[in-house]
């Protein structure tokens, strides 16, 4: 009887257990007993997972079928809505769904009422190639990659395959990086000092750039030698990449920690769940999940500017009058923040409840029972 001889690499692949056990990931990140569970299958090519906390469900793309799918523990797998071959998905700072669409060659936002707004479709007069993945910064700006995977037989119009930034105030779009052949996954470090951008073309590695406000350093600070698709980061700054064999985990400085093996080749990954400690993985035709001991990083609007403590300065009405409306709140949409002073303090948007010498909130209107503050841009906000 002739024995079938398998290549050594295939033998090793067959021997890999499909759990997180034995992959040298520290207990602080994942339990040795944690198992990668397949939640759903039957799609054609899954991508772009994003957790919607208000609805307690995961949304992800099935690109060839031009549909966004949803999964929840209560409802299982369902169709979320049709798409124009959406790839990467993410939430903006207001919890609105952002999607990069291959077929439509654009970046869109799903508003709270379900309507769709196109955020990026043209660079000048030229259409983008096929926006692929997107990252949000705490200032509200959106950074996205634009390889040519979705072009197919269509002609490219823009000059290259670049990384772009959408200005949150004006909607203007600018190129932030031209180093790539096929820019793909993109994610900021939790402190936003670094931007990780994966290339799945001829470059085949992750380039890590210093973030300089609205731009990037001219050259990468360092590289991570792995061909990764989508990526995410945890609250400690570790980066989770998707490549052959599973989810490869690195420290923020590029040091390899280990790998979470997955049955199918993963394409993207995100954190979710009530405590944000479930790692969801889209891999070819399926959706997987594994419980973690660390939470994913959640982008929040940047911290409030430090302000003068009004409590110590307002010992008299005269002092209060001189202080005026000096409270600086976090740069947000001020006209839609109806929270109590106590909640603002808890959220660290105010240092503490500002009062005058008689215990009244600063800028308190006795007639209406409301108080007001002034944001950095001069807009007034009513706090109820």
Image (cartoon, rainbow, N blue to C red):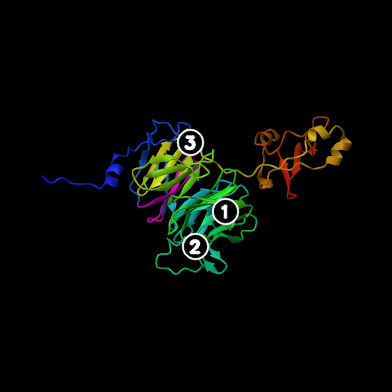
Q: In this orientation, does residue 75 appear? A: no
- Quarter in which the C terminus is drawn: top right
The Cα atoms of the two marked residues, 3 and 2, are separated by: 34 Å
Residue 372 sits in quarter = top right
Whether residue 196 is visible to the viewer of this picture, yes or no, is yes
Spatial CA span between label 1 and label 2: 17 Å
Q: Is residue 150 left or right of residue 361?
A: left
The residue indicated by pointer 2 is 161
Q: Magenta region: which residues?
A: 44-66
What separation in Å lies between label 3 and label 1 (alpha carbons)?
Answer: 25 Å
Disc 3 versus disc 2: nearer the observer:
2
227 lies above or below 36: below
The tag on residue 277 is: 3
Mark 2 secondary-structure assignment:
loop
Read off the residue under disc 1: 142
Q: Quadrant of residue 82?
A: bottom left
Mark 3: few, some, or many residues within 10 Å (few <14, many ≥20)? many
């Amino acid at each position: 009887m002739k024995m079938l001889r398998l290549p050594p690499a295939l033998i090793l692949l067959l021997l890999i257990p499909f759990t997180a056990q034995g992959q040298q990931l520290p207990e602080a990140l994942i339990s040795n007993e944690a198992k990668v569970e397949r939640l759903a299958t039957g799609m054609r090519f899954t991508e772009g997972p994003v957790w919607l906390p208000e609805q307690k469900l995961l949304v992800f793309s099935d690109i060839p079928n031009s549909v966004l799918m949803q999964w929840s523990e209560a409802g299982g797998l369902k169709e979320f809505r049709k798409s124009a071959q959406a790839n990467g998905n993410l939430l903006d700072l207001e919890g609105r769904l952002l999607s990069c669409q291959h077929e439509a060659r654009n970046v869109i936002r799903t508003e709270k009422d379900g309507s769709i707004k196109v955020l990026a479709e043209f660079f000048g007069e030229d259409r983008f190639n096929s926006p692929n993945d997107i990252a949000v910064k705490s200032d509200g700006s959106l950074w996205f990659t634009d390889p040519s995977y979705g072009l197919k037989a269509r002609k490219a119009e823009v000059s290259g395959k670049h990384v772009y930034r959408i200005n949150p105030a004006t909607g203007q779009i600018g190129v932030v990086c031209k180093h790539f052949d096929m820019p793909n996954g993109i994610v900021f470090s939790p402190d936003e000092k670094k931007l990780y951008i994966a290339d799945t073309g001829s470059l085949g590695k992750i380039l890590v750039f210093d973030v300089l406000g609205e731009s990037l350093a001219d050259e990468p600070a360092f590289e991570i030698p792995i061909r990764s698709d989508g990526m995410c980061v945890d609250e400690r700054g570790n980066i989770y990449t998707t490549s052959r064999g599973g989810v490869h985990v690195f420290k923020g400085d590029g040091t390899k920690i280990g790998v979470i093996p997955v049955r199918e080749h993963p394409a993207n990954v995100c954190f979710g769940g009530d405590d944000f400690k479930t790692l969801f993985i889209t891999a070819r035709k399926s959706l997987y999940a594994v419980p973690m001991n660390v939470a994913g990083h959640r982008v929040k609007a940047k911290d409030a500017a430090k302000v003068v403590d009004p409590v110590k300065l307002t010992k008299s009405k005269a002092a209060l009058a001189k202080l005026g409306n000096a409270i600086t709140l976090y740069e947000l949409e001020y006209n839609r923040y109806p929270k109590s002073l106590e909640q603002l303090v808890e959220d660290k948007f105010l240092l503490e409840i500002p009062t005058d010498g008689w215990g009244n909130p600063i800028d308190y209107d006795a007639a209406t029972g409301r108080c007001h503050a002034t944001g950095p841009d001069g807009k007034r906000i009513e706090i109820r």
